Amino acid sequence: MARCYCHWRRVLFFVCTPCISLALLFVYITAMLFAAMNETSTSGTAVRGLDAVYFVASGSSSKTFWDLHLHGDAFWNRLQRTLDNHFNPILCPNNTKRGFENGTFNESLLTQGFSKVINLESTSRNLDQLPQQIQEFITHMQRRDYPALLQPDGVCGAGRKEEKEAPLLLLAIKSTEQNFLNRQAIRQTWGQAGWVAGPKRKGNGGEGGGYVRRVFLLGRGSTEELGGNALQMESEQYGDILQWDFKDTFFNLTLKDVLFWSWFKDSCSRTRFVFKGDDDVFVNTPKLMSYLRDQLKKPHKTLRDFMVGDVIAAAVPNRFNESKYFIPDSFYKGLYPMYAGGGGVVYSGLLAKRLHDISKRLYLFPIDDVYVGMCMVRLNAHPVHHDAFLTFDFPNKEEEELCSYHTILLVHKRRPDEVVKLWVHVKKTQAQCWGVALRVPLSNDTATV
Ligand SMILES: *[C@@H]1O[C@H](CO)[C@@H](O)[C@H](O)[C@H]1NC(C)=O
Ligand SMILES: *[C@@H]1O[C@H](CO)[C@@H](O)[C@H](O)[C@H]1NC(C)=O
Ligand SMILES: *[C@@H]1O[C@H](CO)[C@@H](O)[C@H](O)[C@H]1NC(C)=O
Ligand SMILES: *[C@@H]1O[C@H](CO)[C@@H](O)[C@H](O)[C@H]1NC(C)=O
């Protein structure tokens, strides 16, 4: 009796298990087929099905690979989803490597997606309703092959003299034609190229230094006749100007990142780290040098992903239409991804090259910091927050302390004359403040990542 019961249980087991497995497989395949079919049949207005499954677009603080939120009706989200789906390893397994092999930019893919979405948009919604700045952005967002007007002659920025090792740091500073004074102040102070020593005390030559290069990133200014010639002379004298032929506007700043990465890959491949920042900040370069020396001791994997700055997580797009950061929700929906904002960020040369590659799979986004964050999401890399990047200046009266500027790597914003004064101050107090540590979070709960 007991044996018989056992026998039936075994039969049931052997019959049912494959049945259940097959049923599950069937459900999975059906779901995948539906997703794939929807993807290829967007000629009409049947985009709705697409919203169900897509590669994590952006702005989600969740760690999931698949995301179900329905932000599909905003212009940029819809546009980017055509690309994300194309490179989705599950929906299109054959495409994941494409576009990476020889670094060529698959422009036709971007154009295809763009015209498809633009057609849908013009029937369903009036793009003319968008603010002027966004419209301007949309009409030019497909183009990124602007030629360089001025560039350091085949080398990676100013500062190449008797270097005995690969440059430790390239300072890539966003500037504009009219900000000559900012550039001069930087050249004389924290942006000096050549060998830079780490923090010094008496009798110590400065530990943990390295070679520094410098380049300013510019677009085309509006005062053409005046500016053009002067900038050319400046370029000849200092060899640190990298200027492209696009209008230097706020919503064109992302072009500076994308074009800079491309130039970096060609001209700077040995450089270990990049600082990318504004021309109205003060950087404690000696401290930064010793901080970066320490990073070099970390494993290759860490360096591949290395980005540090003032990290902002789960930011909400600015919906205030008077702001220069204004992004209407018909253009972009959802939160912004984690990104390093405000004034300056440091990343490894290895990461710069990876950002260059991945940027070919992302439509330009009008806010540059956010765009870099979107690239990071797709590289599955996370920027690291450091309290020594002071985007919003010193809290309270901390600035007045003697060694305050030795506890930071960057502070935003400083005028050119302030930069010069601060540099003198930092040099003067260097021996006294030699040992002070970089700022750390005041309370544990702000220590992210
Ligand atoms: C994907 O690649 C494999 C092998 O390279 C090929 O046999 C297959 O037909 C491709 N599939 C599609 C959908 O292109
Ligand atoms: C690589 O480059 C060659 C010619 O330069 C081109 O024919 C080929 O299509 C490219 N491959 C990819 C995947 O872009
Ligand atoms: C960006 O630059 C291009 C080329 O100069 C220009 O036509 C376009 O209007 C600029 N875009 C914005 C948003 O200003
Ligand atoms: C901002 O929005 C308000 C009301 O929504 C509108 O009256 C105003 O004209 C807008 N301003 C701009 C600059 O678009």
Image (tube, grey):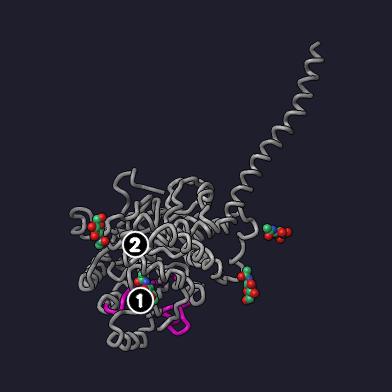
Q: Contact (CB < 8 A) between labels 2 and 1?
A: no
66 vs 413, left or right, is: right
User: What percent of the width, then of the height, locates residue 409?
Assistant: 32, 62
Residue 350: say if magenta: no
Q: Bounds of the magenta span?
A: 150-178
What residue sits 42% from the left and 52% below the top?
A: 59
Q: Quadrant of residue 6?
A: top right
174 vs 273, left or right, is: left
Type of amino acid under label 1: Lys
Residue 159: say if magenta: yes
Which badge, 2 or 1, comes first in the chain's sequence?
2
Few, some or many C-alpha atoms within 10 Å of disc 1 (few <14, some 14-19, many ≥20)? some
User: SS for tag 2?
Assistant: loop
Residue denoted by label 2 = 130
User: What percent of the width, then of the height, locates residue 426?
Assistant: 25, 67
Q: Is residue 425 above or below residue 316?
A: below
- Pick the front one: 410 or 249: 249
Q: CA distance from mark 2 to mark 1?
A: 20 Å
User: SS for tag 1?
Assistant: strand
Q: Quadrant of the N terminus?
A: top right
Residue denoted by label 1 = 247
User: What percent of the width, then of the height, locates residue 65?
Assistant: 53, 48
Few, some or many C-alpha atoms within 10 Å of disc 2 (few <14, some 14-19, many ≥20)? some
Q: Quadrant of ligand 3?
A: bottom left
- Pick the front one: 224 or 153: 224
In the image, the residue with mark 1 has its CB under 8 Å from the nearest atom of ligand 3 = yes
Say if residue 60 shows up in the picture. Answer: yes
What residue sits 28% from the left and 67% below the top?
A: 282
